Amino acid sequence: MSEQLAGTRVVHAVCSHDCPDSCGVLVTVDELSGRAVKMQGDPSHPVTRGFLCGKVAKYLDRVYSPDRLLYPMRRKAGVPKGPAGYGAVKGREAEAFERITWDEALDEIAARLKKIAEEFGPESILPYSYAGTIGQLGYGSMDRRFFHRLGASQLARTICAEAGGTALKNVYGIKLGTRPEDFVHAGLVIAWGANIHGNNVHLWPFIEEARRSGARLVVIDPYKTRTAALADEHLAINPGTDTALALGLMHVILSMGLEDREYIAQCTTGFEELKVHAMKPENSPEKVAAITGISAQTIVTLARAYATAGRNGSRPAAIRLNYGIQRSENGGTAARAVCMLPLLTGAWKYVGGGLQLSTSGSFPFNSDALQMPELMLKSPLGRVARTVNMSQLGQALTMGDAGVGGPPVKAMFVYNSNPAAVAPNQNDVLEGMRRDDMFMVVHEQFFTDTADYADVLLPAPTFLETKDVQGAYGHLFAQVSNRAIEPLGEARNNVRVFGELGRRMGFAEECFDDREDELIDQALTTDHPWFAGMTRARLEQEGHVPLQLPVNKDGVTLPFSTAEWFRTPSGRGELTPVPVFVAPTESRGGADAAKFPLELLARKADNYMNSTFANLAGHQRMELRTAGVLEMHTTDATARGITAGDEVEVFNGRGKIALRALVNGHVGAGVVAARLDWNKLSRDGANVNVLTSERLTDIGGGATFYSTLVEVRKASLAE
Ligand SMILES: Nc1nc2c(c(=O)[nH]1)N[C@H]1C(S)=C(S)[C@@H](COP(=O)(O)OP(=O)(O)OC[C@H]3O[C@@H](n4cnc5c(=O)[nH]c(N)nc54)[C@H](O)[C@@H]3O)O[C@H]1N2
Ligand SMILES: Nc1nc2c(c(=O)[nH]1)N[C@H]1C(S)=C(S)[C@@H](COP(=O)(O)OP(=O)(O)OC[C@H]3O[C@@H](n4cnc5c(=O)[nH]c(N)nc54)[C@H](O)[C@@H]3O)O[C@H]1N2
Ligand code: SF4
Ligand SMILES: [Mo]
């Protein structure tokens, strides 16, 4: 435990970044100055247990960064949209923007939005937000009320998890899985498209504890992540082939009769059909080996180990499936296939067995009360507005009516997101943002790549500066995040901005006056038994409160151990429609491979959070090794006359970027990797997303960042 320093107080907060862990955080605040002086993990949190990841351990650098956007600003007359230059994060904006008051900013936004709504219809206004904060209020409450009442386009928030989340719901009916604490009881852990050490580090100690008791960790990932490097076995699967591998494992399990027939009979539907399909010769280990690049022997061994774990008193098998496999064209099917494995072996029956993809669906927050979708009917539209898919932003902004099926986008309001850097097919996104006939507001903490295109900029607080309530997608505790410090400068949180804007628009409904505590109460108002006793007062007192999940006769929570847990239409685990492997168009087995033969993994950085933190010197130092780098296999480098350290051009039909070749054994032949950054920090003002496509996943309409074909050439010296 930490000693409390004299003259300070300690405030319980929750890390609001888009991470499965949702850490409990203790912020030490100096009473006199009101400044946060220390941040640490809350040791009493049962899952996050007192430590923070490397990114957030340095969080005060972010909060008190001299580069914060602290005041509302307006683009100066005549200054074109887009960055003034590259390499500078701060300093250039003074040339492009002038400071204004909040009143001026809100009046201008309201006037412009009103005019645009009258002239083109309210659906020509597009909100664009994702998960800058995953607090319930910051992620989606007053903002949704505002856009619903306005009649603005709805945004399909698909950029991250929609394919996998929908897949999980298709099979189980609910986003829920093995508790992280229970991984200590596993005998075999499979990290499947899951960079646990990099992206979900609080699961790691539970896995390490299991390994000390003899558990094996197998990582299935085309890239040698930190997790893979630390594992017992790394299976470097060919990208986009996970459906084939899952079917191959099923083939072996069923041929050997290792399935759990009793569990299958009680808890699943569609088994016979799946069995016929999985047993086809096309799913034999040999055929699957040719597709996945994993040997037939390895597939047989893994299938047997997986299916027999948990039997005869041995420790069970747990799959940590994460969102890596579903950022691929057929990633929804792949996620469904993997989700079916524990239904065949009955791994759910054992403590420490099963699968975890996301636990977010187990928090019964009352999102209807927070977001009030019924306000759409009170808008001038008088009906539910059309939906625009955020993973096709380039198309929505550049193709007029054809891109959005209705009035073209004439205004965009960006908050909780940095689409200029994170959205696919970046060249089209930036072309759209450059349009002079589009009014753009950006609510941000920093001068991001997206801020460069704003007409009006609004300052946002960090999670230390605001109050919220939060669930998690990697554990089962609800938490309240208290405001530790006053907002810096003139920062205003999402709730306040959209409430005040509602008033300026003349929306008379009282709901636009609700503030944090009222919204938290509304979020918790439900008679769902899993939230029994979950009140704001209790959360404020205890910091974190566990969900009241059902327990069995031994008092143990065992999701999907019995049929009552399933929320599918059949009330069972659904094994149909049977998953069928189809090679992504953009993969070595796909149609475009002749032209662009290399599979690019356009990855996340271990020390950033998507594009967040990329502008901070301390975080950049931790990422030095992979900054501006293309990781290649020696075969592919040699074939192109490239040696480590060479400048290379990475290109396809959508765009190109200049990077430095790194031959480090992290990728296999045919695969290259580069990671996200801020565009303006790179020499040519672009990041990997100039190469990624707007093609959508097979399920859920998600983005396909990991189905990207490219070619690489040595940069010519003349350039
Ligand atoms: N440090 C850090 N932590 C983060 C984030 C971050 O940017 N940095 N982002 C946060 C966010 S938004 C999310 S959604 C989560 C995501 O957490 P993860 O789901 O772990 O996300 P990814 O890193 O996208 O993908 C995981 C792994 O899948 C691998 N992969 C790619 N294609 C395939 C494939 O076809 N098959 C298989 N088997 N594996 C494949 C990738 O190489 C990667 O190592 O992490 C969160 N945590
Ligand atoms: N190539 C490639 N592209 C990817 C991915 C990938 O793996 N590869 N990952 C994808 C995934 S999984 C995701 S989730 C998306 C993430 O995309 P985004 O959700 O856009 O994530 P960030 O880049 O973290 O940007 C979030 C922004 O929100 C701001 N913010 C934080 N808190 C608040 C707040 O309270 N109010 C307001 N107004 N703003 C706030 C932060 O300052 C930050 O700039 O990126 C996707 N893009
Ligand atoms: S980013 Fe994730 S691991 Fe890091 S402090 Fe936040 S919740 Fe915890
Ligand atoms: Mo994400």
Image: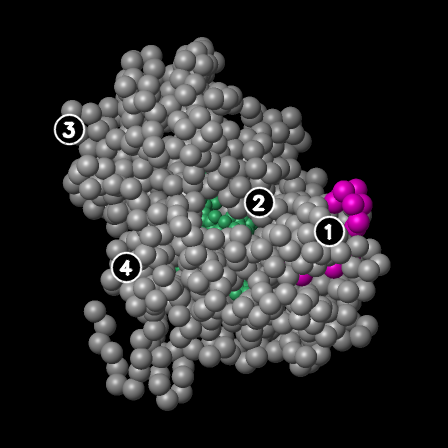
Q: Decide: is 427 above or below 575.
A: below
Q: Residue at x 74, y 45 (%)?
A: 404
Please indicate, yes or no, whether residue 460 appears anywhere in the rendered image: no
Q: Residue at x 20, y 25 (%)?
A: 311
Pointers 2 and 1 in contact (CB under 8 A)? Answer: no
Of helix, strand and loop, which one carries label 2? loop
Gap between marks 2 and 1, in whole Å?
26 Å
> What residue range appears in magenta?
401-414
Q: Amino acid at mark 3?
A: Gly
Mark 3 = which residue? 313
Mark 1 = which residue? 382
Residue 140, position in %: x, y?
54, 57
Sooner in the amino-acid sequence: mark 3 or mark 2: 2
Q: Say whether mark 3 is within 8 Å of ligand 1.
A: no
Q: Quadrant of residue 254?
A: top left
Q: Amino acid at mark 4?
A: His
Q: Nearer the viewer, residue 132 or 634?
A: 132
Mark 4 = which residue? 45
Q: Is residue 453 left or right of residue 55?
A: right
Identify the image quadrant of the N terminus. bottom left
Q: Amino acid at mark 2?
A: Thr
Sooner in the amino-acid sequence: mark 4 or mark 3: 4
Identify the image quadrant of the C terminus. bottom right
Pointers 3 and 2 in contact (CB under 8 A)? Answer: no
